């Protein structure tokens, strides 16, 4: 009976060490990967399809591009939402607040996102 208990203790110890090592390796691998931010250009496409003049769209497009650059500068990989088949809601950048209602697409509620509102000027969101 004693050899059985000894081998059981050794097996459990080896399993615990292996599990701890695997967990550490996975955490190290995940920490090395940059975060992802997904930006929705849908309102711009909707505005174009509605025939909105380019000069009216330009300020909104410039703001979206500025946000993308701010997230890139903060170390995020920035992906266009049109290229994403599925992603957790928290990966989407909060949408622009001042986009005309007709341009809007169903999107993520800004309160439900875990992507922080980054600032390039030290105040507010990008």
Image (cartoon, rainbow, N blue to C red):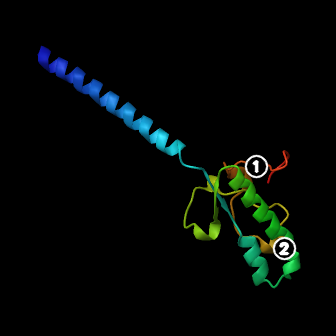
Q: Residue 32 location in percent, x, y? A: 53, 45
Q: Seen from this angle, which residue lies furthest bottom?
A: 51
Where disc 2 sits, the SS reads helix
Query: Residue 122, position in %: x, y?
Result: 84, 45
Name the quadrant of the C terminus.
bottom right
The N terminus - image quarter: top left
Q: Nearer the viewer, residue 64 or 2?
A: 64
The residue wearing badge 2 is 58
Q: In the image, residue 74 lies at what x, y percent? A: 70, 49
Q: Nearer the viewer, residue 96 or 76?
A: 76
- Secondary structure of the residue carrying numbered label 1: loop
In the rendering, which numbered label is found on residue 71? none
Tag 2 or tag 1, which sits nearer the N-term? 2
Residue sitting at 18 percent across and 18 percent down? 5
**Res. 21 image quadrant:** top left
Q: Are marks 1 and 2 in contact (CB under 8 Å)?
A: no
In the rendered view, tell whether residue 2 sits above or below residue 20: above
Q: Is residue 54 above or below residue 111?
A: below
Q: Residues within 10 Å of mark 2 (few under 14, many from 20)?
A: few
Q: CA distance from mark 1 to mark 2?
A: 22 Å
Q: Is residue 71 above or below residue 32?
A: below
Rendered position, 22 above or below 65: above
Local packing at callout 1 (Cα closer than 10 Å; few below 14, some 14-19, many 20+) is some
Q: Is residue 85 left or right of residue 107?
A: left
- Residue in view at x 82 percent, y 60 percent: 97
Taking the view exactly as shown, the residue that stands out farthest to the right is 55
**Residue pictured at 84% horizontal, 82% vertical:** 52
Identify the residue position indicated by label 1 in the image: 118
Q: Is residue 113 left or right of residue 8?
A: right
Residue 62 in the image, given as x and y percentages of width and height: 81, 67
């Amino acid at each position: 009976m004693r050899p059985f208990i000894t081998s059981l203790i050794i097996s459990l110890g080896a399993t615990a060490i292996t599990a701890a090592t695997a967990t550490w390796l996975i955490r190290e691998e995940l920490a090395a990967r940059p975060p992802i931010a997904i930006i929705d250009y849908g309102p711009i496409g909707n505005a174009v399809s509605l025939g909105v003049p380019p000069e009216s769209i330009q300020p909104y497009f410039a703001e979206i591009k500025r946000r993308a650059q701010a997230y890139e500068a903060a170390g995020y990989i920035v992906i266009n939402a049109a290229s994403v088949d599925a992603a957790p809601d928290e990966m989407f950048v909060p949408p622009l607040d001042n986009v005309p209602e007709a341009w809007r697409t169903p999107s993520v509620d800004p309160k439900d996102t875990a992507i922080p509102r980054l600032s390039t000027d030290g105040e507010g969101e990008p």
